Amino acid sequence: MKRFAVAALAVGLPLLSVATAHASTQSYTVSGVAWKDLNGDGIRQSSEPLLPDIKIGSTTTDAAGRYKLEMPSSPDGAGSPAIQAGRSIEDGRFVLTRPSQGPAGTNSDFDWNNGWLQTNEAPVQGLLDNIDVGYMPTRNDAAVKITPEQTGPVHVGDDVAYEIAIDNNAFPSYVGVRVVFPDGVTLDPFAGVSSWAEPVGTTGMDIRFLRAIEPNETRTREVSGKVTKPIDGLVTVGLIDRASDVDGANDKSSAPLKTAETSTTPTSTPVATQPTSPAANPSPKPQPVVAKSPEVKALANTGADPTWPLIGGLVLLAAGVGTVLFARRRRA
């Protein structure tokens, strides 16, 4: 008996493993329709047309607007199959409608920001049906603005940077922006998050985004470069893919870029004196000549005390005067 049980297990376990592996790799079908949501309410009405030739995942809708996709394995219920629909059709005039607005059989199941399928439904007997996608007339309006980040004067050799801001309304926007600098700027490599840039000429770039600009979102990016020669122009930014934007009045913006002149200190120039006429500058009147008195040389400073010589001189002078007076009296 024990030998029989062991033999049964030896045969049964491999068969069970094969069956389990087969079940885990069993494919299933995803199906649905694409329709034009004319009133934009996110719910498919019978009067709204189905859309042929709409790309969904790796296939397209047929002439009746229906599609089928074979998925390689059954989802585990924790997420949606990796299927993406196009974000817009007819050159942007119709965009993905708001998802999950009604019953499962009449609403749209794809995220209107990025086009990825969003559903928690599991296949029933190998079929995941009513996975539909709707496209409504565009209602998005993205306004673009450019602002210089430098506040002082710009000189040749300076680095310059500008902020690009896109303000969105209550609907997703599937737009990019084109930025163009005037000649004389060498652009820096673009380093925006979840976005990339494609060069346009030598001083421009087209910036595109991996994800749509969400309702009421303000998205900003920075562009920069180095000034290589004198400039007096504008840095411009404008929306591309503008067919999906309802208001063209706010699709463009610009900011000045002008280099300051290099100041030099002027050197002073000597002023030439002009000859004056005789009438304007009469000759001075002749002045009387004053005869100079002979110079008296100063006594040498011998360092001796002059008091006693002076007294001696006065005594001799007095003696002389007395002698003269005495002689005159005798004659008299």
Image (cartoon, helix red, strand yellow):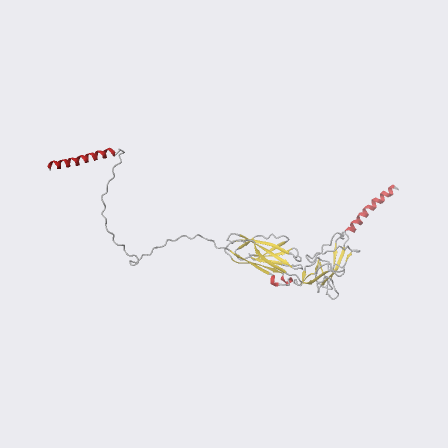
Number of callouts: 0
Q: Residue placed at 81% from the left, 48% from the top?
A: 16
Q: Quadrant of the C terminus?
A: top left
* Nearer the observer, 292 or 162: 292
Outermost right residue: 1
User: Percent from the top left, x then y, of residue 37?
Assistant: 71, 63
| Residue in view at x 87 percent, y 41 percent | 3
* Quadrant of the image containing the N terminus: top right
Give the residue drawn at x 19%, y 35%.
318
Picture quadrant where residue 33 is located: bottom right
The answer to whether 324 is drawn above or below residue 15 in the figure is above
**Residue farthest to the bottom?**
47
* Residue 81 or residue 235, whichever sits in front: 235
Pick the front one: 329 or 99: 329
Measured as percent of width and height from the top left, residue 132 is found at 74, 60
Q: Quadrant of residue 4?
A: top right
Does 162 sit left or right of 293 as displayed? Answer: right
Instruction: Return the residue nearer the eye: 7 or 256.
Output: 256
- 311 w.r.t. 14: above or below: above
Query: Percent position (x, y) of residue 180?
Result: 56, 58
Left/right of residue 151 with respect to residue 81 in the rendered view: left
Q: Give the percent coordinates (x, y) of residue 228.
A: 51, 54
